[in-house]
Image (tube, rainbow, N blue to C red):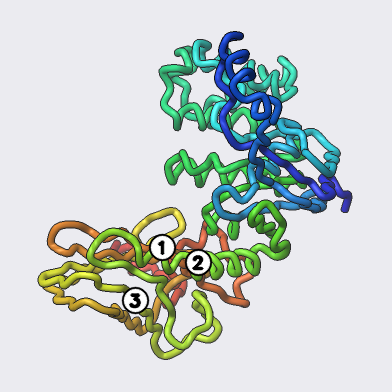
Amino acid sequence: MTTVIQAEKLSKRYRIGEYERYHALRDVLTRALRSPLSFLRRSQPETFWALKEVSLDVREGEVVGLIGRNGAGKTTLLKILSRITRPTGGWAEIHGRVGSLLEVGTGFHPELSGRENVFLSGAILNMSKREIDRKFDEMVAFAEVEKFIDAPLKHYSTGMQMRLAFAVAAHLEPEILLVDEVLAVGDAEFQKKCLGKMQDVSKSGRTIVFVSHQMNQIRRLCARAIWIDGGGLRRDGAAAVVVNEYEAACLSLDTDTIEQAAGSIAFRPWIIENSQSNELNLDEIPEKTVLRFRAHVKQKIRKGVLFIALRSNENTILWSNMYHELQLSPGLVDFVHSFERLPLNPGVYVWEIRVFDGDHWSQHTQIPEFSVVSKEDSNVFDDLKGCLKLNFSFEVQAQTALEIEAS
């Protein structure tokens, strides 16, 4: 396969600090007379490296996920690849038509109508007028803004602007699509729609580089993941492996933050008993699946309420329960749930758990994600399979002539 993105030791340095205030000539002369040495001495601006010596190759048809904490350098990398920002050091080459969606409404003008902005944004993305005309109705329908297409963009909500911006970029039919964390603005239904569109783009053999903080999206869409940490490349490999390592590192770092959170109770990451990971392997199902949701009770809770729910990766509640009149003393406590069987298809799920202490609900935990895997399942994320794996029997029964007449 042909290499379409090649980067070698990409680095980007930024200056920190404000611009110097405006000074009149008399102020400059006064400062020079009072302290000639300090006037001649120029202060050095503070700098930091947003990206430092990152090298990578992306081949044609690959779907690559960029993961990492806020400020790690993911967006900076995409901006350099999109030719929006120049690198301080290193170089990058891209072979193919590029479509990028790095910020909501990039290239949009608030005073122009949605229709005019489609043509403006398309022109910025190097689409011809004929191409925009041909795909206009399809883009507007995808964005679901038909009724407002001739209204000024300044009257659009952020979500409407984002939908329209994504529709234009996705229908550009680029050979390479660069997408930043823009799907977080949309609702669950639109996120699913965007992921489906990007899956269509990837199946057509085009290349996608995708930034997201939602690990279920990375698992679902990407075969490969690149972990950017502190401006450098920390890990590059199969998406499932890299995401698991990233989540483990985040959990180990977040323990202190969780403990310092406000409230009378702080949840720690949940665990599956007698397991080294957050995966439930359907090929090796134990007699019981036991989950421990550990928490640090900071203040005594006399009549607490515990809420627990299992959600799909589209945030739909699949199961929930609520327990009342809980008496919790300060210290560590485990909320242990034992399931005879979890009838789940392979996929990625989320446990939500929170406690009401009489005044406030605790912040709920959604880490780590809950993965259900099986070697026998050839397509783990087939949307047609749904979430539940139910035991059932099936047969076709032919009716006799007498039964047909009776009916």
- In-front residue for pair 231/320: 231
Question: Which residue is drawn at the image coordinates 61% and 55% (left, top)?
Answer: 67
User: Dot 3: within a 10 Å radius of its alpha carbon, few (fewer than 14), some, or many (20 or more) residues?
Assistant: some
Question: Which residue is drawn at the image coordinates 70% and 44% (left, top)?
Answer: 77
* C-alpha span from label 3 to label 2: 16 Å
User: Dot 1: within a 10 Å radius of its alpha carbon, few (fewer than 14), some, or many (20 or more) residues?
Assistant: few
Question: Which residue is drawn at the image coordinates 38% and 64% (left, top)?
Answer: 258
Q: Position of residue 18 (x, y in %)?
A: 56, 29
User: Dot 2: within a 10 Å radius of its alpha carbon, few (fewer than 14), some, or many (20 or more) residues?
Assistant: few
Report which residue position mark 1 lands on: 257
* C-alpha span from label 3 to label 1: 15 Å
Q: Amino acid at mark 2?
A: Leu
Answer whether labels 1 and 2 touch (C-beta < 8 Å): yes
Q: Secondary structure at mark 3?
A: strand
Q: Position of residue 318 (x, y in %)?
A: 35, 63
Question: Which residue is drawn at the image coordinates 31% and 66% (left, top)?
Answer: 353
Q: Quadrant of the C terminus?
A: bottom left
Which residue is most to the top?
25
Answer whether labels 3 and 2 touch (C-beta < 8 Å): no
First in sequence: mark 3 vs mark 1: 1
Depth-wise, is mark 3 or mark 2 nearer the camera? 2
Query: Would residue 69 be found to the left or right of residue 389 on screen?
Result: right
- In-front residue for pair 45/183: 45
Query: Would residue 204 be found to the left or right of residue 293 on screen?
Result: right
Above or below residue 210? Residue 33 is above
Above or below residue 314? Residue 399 is below
Report which residue position mark 2 lands on: 253
Q: Which label was assigned to residue 130?
A: none
Q: Position of residue 106 (x, y in %)?
A: 60, 26
Q: Secondary structure at mark 1?
A: helix
Report which residue position mark 3 lands on: 294
Q: Amino acid at mark 3?
A: Arg
